[in-house]
């Protein structure tokens, strides 16, 4: 039996007192979503490679995770780190494993992670340190291909899971069960602070809850009200814990919210929008990052949307003691009171009929505490879009491609609104497929902008093509006589041109190629006139619907017996032709 001194459970609406712990009633709050304050600006640099997954970042700004590496056009996700400039280092350059990820990094540069890969490869939890890769063995001293090493603190303590239970590894690299974990519990440790306090999750009697291990005691942190499932993702040096809490039975709409646990109180951080979110990390200042959905920074009971800092940032996964934030493919570094211009773009997604005008609503914002001089907005429109008009709160704009607005000086903490009206003109489509048109807007300044990751915006719109117009379906047939041809005899080509309608065929042109060793004896047509040798060109004029024209060409071949030759006839008109597979035909003549 597990005594109350060994495992304690936090539940909403009750207070439990043990000989070692007093557990408090949880409080639920709602986040206030906001933009970052004026002057709170960041420099942003990208992380090299692609397929990036960011997991952790130390106080030196070194990021851990994985990225795809190119080997003879095959791409493998490899554990690695990005330095402070965003350059990726593959931690498995010898390809001991085809699929790996670095899960945690400490301030000494030691990294832990997981090798996936195939059965004939090194698999399971590993330590990357000083250029060496060390397997982390399970509770039985064996390799566990399903084990995970999730974090390593500055003292070298590693947290993770092996044999389906939460474990730690120290310098002997053999797993040890975390004290306080009840028999039969499963789960995984995800993070540890430098005090050796560990968080993660356990499943006990079918209930999966966020868990804290400290001083030989395991605490079940419970869930937010109405939820059944929770998981802890990170812990700071003050034992503040963040993670997720989820409704799994549908009683609360299957919502999932990020939480902060602090001294026995679990707080709902809310979301930026919707009902889904995760808190991934927290630093010692109590600043929290995650996704809800979309990247957020939470502090002082306010959730800030980081999309205004980096528009392509989808999640904030790590924050260090310097306030640097790492997410998918980006690192945000605080750079207060520097110029940071942003641009946003709103337009209907469609479908919109071709020829129907619509607006791009563009906002250029100076989110810094200094003026932005020489501001310029450039709009790169799809070739199917025509700029009709542009209005702006200030400055002047062109309506020729690319559409450029010279906005002059944009004052600190101010915005300029631009309305760009466009008209889509796309060709008709026989398939009925929609056509995508777009605007790529980019803002620039004569001053240095500390953050280039939010200087552009893109919006595409679906356009419905016009229906296929009526036209004139012109076709041609060609015959030869006699065939086979006796050497020395004349050959006659007979072509019939027909307009199958439904409209008149304007300026109909017939052409026919003639073998170069033939001499033309005569050319006759029932419409228009013909000239030339090879090709012959006949201007047949306008053909009414269902009207026909014939062209007869008599030639004298100068060829040897046993040979063959081709002649090709083509027809076209200035009218739209809905059927083009009958516009050309050929005949082959044999000589005996």
Image (tube, rainbow, N blue to C red):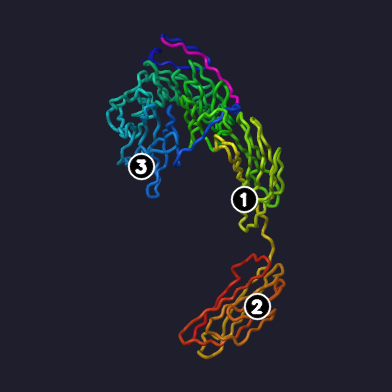
Cα separation between marks 2 and 3: 67 Å
Which SS class for mark 3?
loop
Q: Which residue is mark 1?
A: 382
Query: Which residue in the protein does label 3 denote?
Result: 98
Within 10 Å of disc 2 (Cα), the crowding (few <14, some 14-19, many 20+) is many
Q: Residues within 10 Å of mark 3 (few under 14, many from 20)?
A: many
Q: Closer to the observer: label 2 or label 3?
A: 2
Q: How many marks?
A: 3
Q: Of the residues under marks 2 and 3, which one precedes in the sequence? A: 3
Please, is residue 30 above or below residue 357 in the view? above
Where residue 269 sits, quadrant-wise, is top right
**Residue at 41% across, 33% down:** 64
Q: Residues within 10 Å of mark 1 (few under 14, many from 20)?
A: some
Image quarter (top left, top right, bottom left or bottom right) of the N terminus:
top left
Q: Position of residue 457 (x, y in %)?
A: 59, 41
Which one is closest to the eye, mark 1 or mark 2?
A: 1
Q: CA distance from mark 1 to mark 2?
A: 40 Å
Find disc 2 in the rendering and name its residue: 538
């Amino acid at each position: 039996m597990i005594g109350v001194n060994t495992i304690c459970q936090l539940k909403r609406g009750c207070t439990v007192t043990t000989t070692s712990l007093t557990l408090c009633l949880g409080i639920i709050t709602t986040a206030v979503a906001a933009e970052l304050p004026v002057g709170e600006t960041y420099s942003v640099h990208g992380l090299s490679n692609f397929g990036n997954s960011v997991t952790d970042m130390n106080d030196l700004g070194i990021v851990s995770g994985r990225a795809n590496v190119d080997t003879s056009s095959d791409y493998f996700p490899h554990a690695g780190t990005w330095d402070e400039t965003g350059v990726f280092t593959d931690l498995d350059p010898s390809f001991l494993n085809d699929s790996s990820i670095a899960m945690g990094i400490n301030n000494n540069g030691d990294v832990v992670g997981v090798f996936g890969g195939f059965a004939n490869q090194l698999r399971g939890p590993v330590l990357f340190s000083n250029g060496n890769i060390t397997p982390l063995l399970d509770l039985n001293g064996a390799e566990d291909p399903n084990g995970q090493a999730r974090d390593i603190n500055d003292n070298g303590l590693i947290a993770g899971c092996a044999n389906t239970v939460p474990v730690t590894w120290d310098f002997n690299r053999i797993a040890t069960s975390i004290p306080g974990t009840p028999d039969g519990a499963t789960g995984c440790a995800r993070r540890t602070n430098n005090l050796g306090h560990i968080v993660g999750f356990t499943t006990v009697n079918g209930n999966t809850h966020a868990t804290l291990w400290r001083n030989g005691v395991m605490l079940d942190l419970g869930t937010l009200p109405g939820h059944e499932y929770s998981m802890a993702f990170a812990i700071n040096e003050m034992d503040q814990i963040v993670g997720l809490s989820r409704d799994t039975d549908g009683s609360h709409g299957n919502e999932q919210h990020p939480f902060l646990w602090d001294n026995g109180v679990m707080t709902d951080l809310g979301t930026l929008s919707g009902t889904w979110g995760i808190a991934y990390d927290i630093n010692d200042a109590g600043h929290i990052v995650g996704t809800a959905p979309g990247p957020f920074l939470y502090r002082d009971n306010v959730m800030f949307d980081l999309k205004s800092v980096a528009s392509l940032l989808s999640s904030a996964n790590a924050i260090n003691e310097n306030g640097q934030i790492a997410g998918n493919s980006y690192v945000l570094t605080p750079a207060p009171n520097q110029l940071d211009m942003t641009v946003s773009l709103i337009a209907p997604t469609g479908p919109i009929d071709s020829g129907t005008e619509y607006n791009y609503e563009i906002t250029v914002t100076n989110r810094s505490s200094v003026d932005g001089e020489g501001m310029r907005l450039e709009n790169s429109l799809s070739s199917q879009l025509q700029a009709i008009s542009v209005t702006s709160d200030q400055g002047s704009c062109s309506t020729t491609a690319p559409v450029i607005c010279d906005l002059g000086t944009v004052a600190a903490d101010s915005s300029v609104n631009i309305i760009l009206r466009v008209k889509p003109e796309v060709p008709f489509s026989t398939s009925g497929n929609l056509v995508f048109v777009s605007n790529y807007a980019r803002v620039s300044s004569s001053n240095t902008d500390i953050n280039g990751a939010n200087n552009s915006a893109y919006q595409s719109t679906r356009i419905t093509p016009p229906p296929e117009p009526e036209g004139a379906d012109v076709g041609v047939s060609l015959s030869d006589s006699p065939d086979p041809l006796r050497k020395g005899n004349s050959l006659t080509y007979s072509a019939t041109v027909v307009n199958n309608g439904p409209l008149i065929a304007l300026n109909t042109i017939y052409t026919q190629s003639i073998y170069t060793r033939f001499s033309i004896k005569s050319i006759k047509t029932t419409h228009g006139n013909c000239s030339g040798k090879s090709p012959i060109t006949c201007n047949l004029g306008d053909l009414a619907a269902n009207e026909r024209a014939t062209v007869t060409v008599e030639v004298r071949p100068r060829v040897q017996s046993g040979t063959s030759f081709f002649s090709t006839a083509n027809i076209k008109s200035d009218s739209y032709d809905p059927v083009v597979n009958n516009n050309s035909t050929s005949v082959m003549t044999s000589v005996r």
